[in-house]
Amino acid sequence: MTTVYVPCDSSAVSVGADEVAAALAAVEGVQVLRNGSRGMLWAEPLVEVVTERGRVGYAGVSAEDVPRLVAAGLLTGEDTPECLGVVDEHEWLRSQRRVSFARVGLIEPTDIAAYGEHGGWAGLRRALSLAPADVVAEVTTSGLRGRGGAGFPAGVKWRTVLDAPAGLRFVVCNLDEGDSGTFADRMLCEGDPFTLIEGMVIAAHATGASEGYVYCRSEYPAVVTTLRRAIEVAYAHGYLGERITGSDLSFDLELRVGAGAYICGEETSMLESLEGRRGEVRAKPPIPALHGLFGRPTVINNTLTFAAVPMILADGGAAYAALGTGRSRGTQVFQLAGNIARGGIVEADFGISLGDLVTGYGGGTLSGRPVRAVQVGGPLGAYLPVDRLDVPMDYEALAAAGGMLGHGGIVVFDDTVDMARQARFAMEFCAAESCGKCTPCRVGAVRGVETLDRIIAGVRREDNLLLLEDLCTTMTKGSLCAMGGLTPMPVRSAVQHWPEDFDAPAVHDIPSSGGSGP
Amino acid sequence: MSHGTQTDAAATRAATVRRIAEQHASARGPLMPALHGVVAELGHIDPLDVPVVADVLNLSVAEVHGVVSFYTDFRTRPAPAHTVHLCRAESCQALGSQPLYEDTVRRFAGREDVEVDHVFCFGNCPLGPSGTVDGRLHGRLTPERITRLTQDWQP
Ligand SMILES: Cc1cc2nc3c(=O)[nH]c(=O)nc-3n(C[C@H](O)[C@H](O)[C@H](O)COP(=O)(O)O)c2cc1C
Ligand code: SF4
Ligand code: FES
């Protein structure tokens, strides 16, 4: 029997992995296992054959290729044009530091025995041997900052919940991942869901919480299936529920599904949604750590924040803090997207340069044309021009360069991009996804689209650029949350770095309403 | 259709909605799971379902209506036979999603049985343009692939 891995990750499936798996399963003497993705999305469907040398990879395989590849010796790891060699030795992977993603792509996602064999539960075991305050101290020592965007120190948040008045507490995982260009939460949960569960159980022990929720966006149906299955398996093996692994800790976990609202990634809007209301942002204070879900103290963290915790507890906070740079400790799971030759997951220490990611790992654009703009940090992040590619990827350095790390998404555009259109889209997105609670965002974004339409049409350009800048100031200063508050980031960066794109030939009339279509 | 059958159908639907809502009634914050349950089983949330859900979960009709209207997924009209949902977010834009979207909208214009809509990101960004065809995710979409994926759809 030859063992062949074909990823079940939804990206791999989106380019034909299920058909490849079926074609291979029909071959005599082949056992097909469905792993998560290695994160080399550029190579999907990536077929791996277990050989004496290790797992040999074949990139971009289609079902029609299977007979030819089998005839050419795929089952014994022979060289073909698609062959990447032993995948673990491939430079693209070997040079990364996989901490949170250590197991993703290696194992079958809900195989709990394989999880344990690959280092799973070591963090939980150590955590359960420590007092809650000591677990929080490890997280504080690690320097771990929230991966959802704001970069708030996780240890500080956990401490606040631990010190809250006694009674019911919750742990909530933010799996809403709405930013364009981000997919790490999804790939972790489709490929190695027990890591998230382990991180959340450790958080429950550290903060005295007895119930938890994962809030997953509805655009991720494969995550819902895999994570629900993993939760069932974890219950069956005593890693969730009463007296976890025989300890005094009891913790229940449930997955809830969003319903197509970007704003529900904002933590207070998410809590509203979990409680069964419209996803409208709450004013802070009170902070969720003290007054969160159903008014109770609540730890709410991003998926990747929880995913870093098992390793931090297993190896100690100091080991994690030894990686990274400045006030950005540990590794970041970067996500290379857009017009890029080799897109996917690059987990590396903080401090790697944007250029190393885009041109090094990413290999430049997919189209082969020059890079013109890179949007870092999702739809609320700035567009950076190529002369900023030397910026080190850490929270502070990026902020100094006028950018934002956000959830670590990097979207590359080639020289055919029209930056005025991108600025317009930022406003359009805000108008579409605003929760409607405050006027600067709700009305400002609609005015922003109209103003940019006039600029694009060449109507009173100078006046309208001034008006746009006014709108940006109002939105930045007057919005209740970062949706309205940061939408000016991509808009202003586009105007600042690519003024030539806002210089349409002048006309004299205001365009008809046809100009406001997509 | 006689008035009687309509009333019967309405009564059956109301009983189904009541059963679904009751399944979730003991959960904390049961409204979202209950509404998802109605969409999963009945395809959409009818205006007449709202008072039933409100009654079971002990909420006001206005509250339930407010939630239904806030979230895109809670459709209030029956789903069409087929759907094409294309990503229009930035990463897919960088890979040409906008012309693909416009082409697809034009292609199915006037088709009652096909819904073409946009979504902001499926988490399949480097393999864009991404989209779902009858709920199944596809990457690296082109007009030709959409033709192949939808060729059996009879108007
Ligand atoms: C408009 C908006 C959207 C957000 N979307 C997400 C999201 O999709 N995922 C996420 O983890 N955090 C998101 N956040 C950040 C959360 O509000 C919150 O800071 C985070 O869940 C805290 O977890 P962390 O400290 O581990 O990052 C969003 C914030 C805003 C203002
Ligand atoms: S800024 Fe926008 S999304 Fe945030 S609270 Fe105000 S209206 Fe809602
Ligand atoms: S931006 Fe289209 S899938 Fe993410």
Image (cartoon, coloured by chain):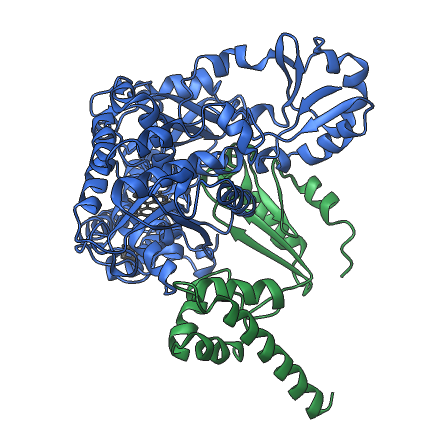
Chain colours: A blue, B green
Q: Residue at x 58, y 70 (%)?
A: B77
Q: Nearer the viewer, residue B108 or B11?
A: B11
Q: Splitting the image into 4 quarters, where does residue A11 fall?
A: top right
Q: Quadrant of ligand 2?
A: bottom left
- Residue sitting at the far bottom: B3
Say which quarter of the image contains residue A348. top left
Question: Where A68 falls versus A294 (above or below)?
Answer: above
- Could you say where residue B11 lies in the image, as x and y percent from the top left? 62, 84
Judge from the rendering whether residue A500 lies leftward or rightward of residue A12; answer left or right.
left
Residue located 83% across and 23% down the image: A28
Does any portion of residue A450 appear in the rendered image?
no
Total marks placed: 0
Name, please, the residue furthest toward the front: A246
- Quick check: A332 above or below A73? below
- Residue A341 in the image, given as x and y percentages of width and height: 53, 23
The residue positioned 56% from the left and 55% from the top of the image is B117
Q: Nearer the viewer, residue B46 or A478?
A: B46
Q: Residue B74 at x, y = what percent?
A: 51, 64
Question: Relative to residue A269, is residue A291 drawn left or right?
Answer: left
Q: Quadrant of the N terminus of chain A?
A: top right
Q: Can residue A478 be spotted in the picture?
A: yes
Considering depth in this image, is A137 or A331 the residue closer to the camera? Answer: A137
Q: Quadrant of residue A293?
A: bottom left
- Expressed as whole percent of the image width and height from the top left, the position of residue B45 reads 54, 71
Q: Name the one closer to the observer, A480 or A147.
A: A147
